[in-house]
Image (cartoon, helix red, strand yellow):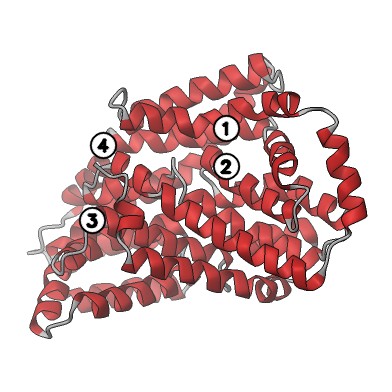
Amino acid sequence: MTAGVTLLIFFILLACAIPIGVAMGIITAVSGSVDPGFAADSAYVIRSMLDGIDGSTLLAVPMFVLSGIIMAKGGISRRLFDLFIYIFGKRTAGIPCAVIATCLFYGAISGSAPATVIAVGGMAIPMLAHLGYDKVFVVALIAVSSSLAVIIPPSIPFVLFGASTGVSVGHLFTAGILPGLLVAIFLMAYALVYCKINGEDRDTIHFTVKALRDQGFEKVLKGSVWALLTPVIILGCICGGVATPAEASVISVYYALVVSVFFYKTLAPKDIWGILIESVKTYGPILFLLAAAAAFSRVIVLLEVPVLMGNWVLTHGVNKLVLLFIVNVVLFLVGMLMDTSPAILILAPVLSPIVAQVGVDPVHFGVIMVVNLAIGFVTPPVGINLFVAKSMSGLPIMTIAKKAAPMILLFGAALLLIIFIPAISLAFVG
């Protein structure tokens, strides 16, 4: 089959609501069956699937999933929230800013945007509603801020991008720090403007913050310091050359267990078996997707899709800015319709060599891709954060999406800065 026919069949399968992993498996199987002369026969497909999940880098994915679930069950989100309320609470928009900061740090622990919506939303939505904030604003703020979970390291999408393209995962983790902080700052600026325009119930807020401050900073910090150290330890191990990303992910699991069982005492040994089962259920679908995507990407390479697209770029003299504009529009549309992980596994091997031809650093492009796809968590029709937020709040999806629109625009503005100022991503990359 030609590249055009293969891609057409793939999109038809997706339009028929066939799961992405299954659709990729069908394409890889059909390609060799229809054309006996095509290199991707059944044996090749099976080898490709096994090879695709055999890389040491991918070992980081199940370990980060397990670590995130352990910390989530350990109930650390409340401790983080208390700390940031203590820090920001007395200022205008201090409580919403505390929500954003909690999403940022909790995302660094869980690595999952939907998990961050659940953990932070479960405590923040009723609390902020009690403090007089508009419930729709609060739910939208949490849904958008939780997208930071896939940007700030350690990020599973960065692991998948690195595994798909050969780019250093450690460099990607380091490159994600400033972009994640930049998006968080933009969201905090919006919260400040929103609260200045709509006002706050300062008396009720002051009472809540005072009750927390009466405990003293030392006690509040003591309750959250172990959670705050999680991303520091992981990045320190990787950037300091102490451990590879896969080894650091294992360290994070042991660290999460020690903190939750011995320091916070929120988990008992009997809870560990249930956590392992939940981790397997979470990682199982990802594992199948990884295997199918590995075979699918090799079929795409055999069909010379990256070469054809690269030649088209060179033939038509498309410059760097135009190409990045086209790529980001494609990524935005894909993010509206597809989850981040399959989008990266399918598109990263195709797009990376193309943008490299016009001088885009591969680490920089990895950040651009992940930040762009992170917006898809809060854009209809498939924005998973919106669905999770709806289930928690009872609000209609489009009501949340409309309130989130200004924040999504600011997310996009931060993305533009990241695109046009590579130093934001590459400042700390060696």
Q: Going 70% across and 26% down the picture, which residue do you hit? A: 223
Q: Going 84% across and 50% down the picture, which residue do you hit? A: 127
Q: Secondary structure at mark 4?
A: loop
Between marks 1 and 3, how big is the CA–CA gap? 29 Å
For marks 3 and 4 on the same chain, the one whose residue lies earlier in the sequence: 4
Q: Quarter holding the N terminus?
A: bottom left
For this rendering, which residue is in front, 50 or 429? 429
Q: Secondary structure at mark 2?
A: helix
Three-letter code, disc 1: Leu
Mark 4 packing: few (<14 Cα in 10 Å), some, or many (20+)?
few
Q: Secondary structure at mark 3?
A: helix
Residue 403: x %, y % from top left: 69, 73
For marks 2 and 1 on the same chain, the one whose residue lies earlier in the sequence: 2
The dot on residue 105 is 2
Q: Which residue is mark 4?
A: 55
In the rendered structure, the answer to whether residue 261 lies left or right of residue 252 reads: right
Three-letter code, disc 3: Pro
Between marks 2 and 1, how big is the CA–CA gap? 7 Å
